[in-house]
Amino acid sequence: MLSLAAAADAAAGDRCTLDRATGTTIDPAPWARHAIGTRWNLPTDRIALQEQGPDGWYRIYTVKSDGSDRIDIPQVTGKHQGAPYWHPSGRYLFFIAEMPAWKSPALFGNPDYEALPGFGLHDDIWLATPDGRSTWKLTNEPNEKHQGILLPVISPDDRRVAWAQRHADKTYEIRIADFVETPQPHLENVTPYRPGGNAYYEPGSFTSDSRSLLYTSDQDTHSFWRSQIYRLDLDSGQGTRLTTGKDYNEHPTVVKTPTGDWVVYMSTRGVSRLPFNLFLGTDWYAMKPDGSGVKRLTTLSAKAKGNPEHSDTLAVACTVAIAPQGDGFLGDIYDDLKKQSGYVRSVHLRCD
């Protein structure tokens, strides 16, 4: 008779994890409508998202994995806030919030359009407790026209925070700082990185050993719409290109599996352009952290007869939040890049 530990190991071996997956099945109904920026904290089993309120401002909330027990994080500046990212323990939630003094035109139904959370302009990094009762401002950016911060992420060992810094001259760099909790949460020892010189930079996630950061950049292609994925070694400061070709690749998320780290990312590789649509859709791919073993996970944007994942509407697969058992994820899908709107789908890994 199997012991409980042996039974658990056997059950884990039967699960379809990313290293073994050959494809996916996607629930037909969205897991969340009119929400994006999904992040899943496994110790607390809570999910953070951002949504646009009736007043047009983006805000952050968290729920349990069954969708219950919604907690709204206060709007610390009364304007846009988003891009939530959990502290590994679940004690804090990192996010970006628009500077209160900034004003820009409204477009596509969005107030202060330039400061939408996905654009990384006119904002600072903030921190909140999961109940939203305590908040801390972690950066203090100048209120300049092109200044901003994009996508803060924290390392699995909870020691370092990385983000993309945009300057008033429109140049970018990666910044990595130490996260210190006492006497109150703050950042120290901010270090800038430009591993490919003057280029666009956007953080994805740290590797599971916290020694490297995966990021997106156009440092080789010199075109954002042909951005590639790289691995930054934090000791040497060197960046290594992982994706190849001229496809548009972005949003790498490191996933720990029974055989080591894998990476989920979005790509235009092999997609079909919809008629009369300016933008290409994307699909989720996976690879090892050295760039090998590339495989396609979804066919959201592959027009083929009998393909249940494809519909004749724009589907831009973006960031993912891995499920606790590692056998699937919640994935953000943008349906309008101009409006920065989308929804969340539940994706299950399949091992044929």
Image (spheres, rainbow, N blue to C red):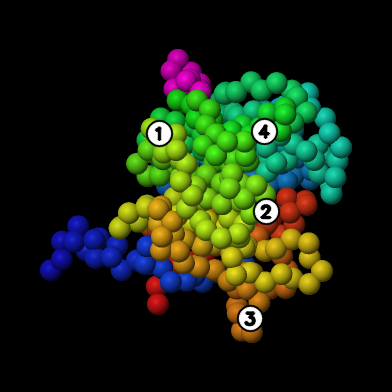
Total numbered badges shown on the rendered structure: 4
Query: Which of pointers 3 and 4 lies earlier in the amino acid sequence?
Result: 4
Q: Which residues are magenta?
A: 180-190
Where in the figure is residue 158, as x and y percent of width and height?
Answer: 41, 33
Q: Amino acid at mark 3?
A: Ala
Identify which residue is drawn at 41% across, 30% down: 159
**Which sits earlier in the primary sequence, circle 1 or circle 4?**
4
Residue under numbered circle 1: 236
Location of the N terminus by quadrant is bottom left
Three-letter code, disc 1 = Ser
Whole-angstrom CA distance, mark 1 to mark 4, is 22 Å
Disc ID at residue 171: 4
**Spot occupied by residue 329 in the image (x, y as percentages of width and height):** 49, 58
Q: CA distance from mark 3 to mark 1?
A: 45 Å
Residue 88: image location, x then y, percent: 42, 39
Q: Give above or below for 272 relative to 335.
A: below
Give amino acid for label 4: Thr
Say which residue label 3 marks: 304
Q: Residue furthest left?
A: 1
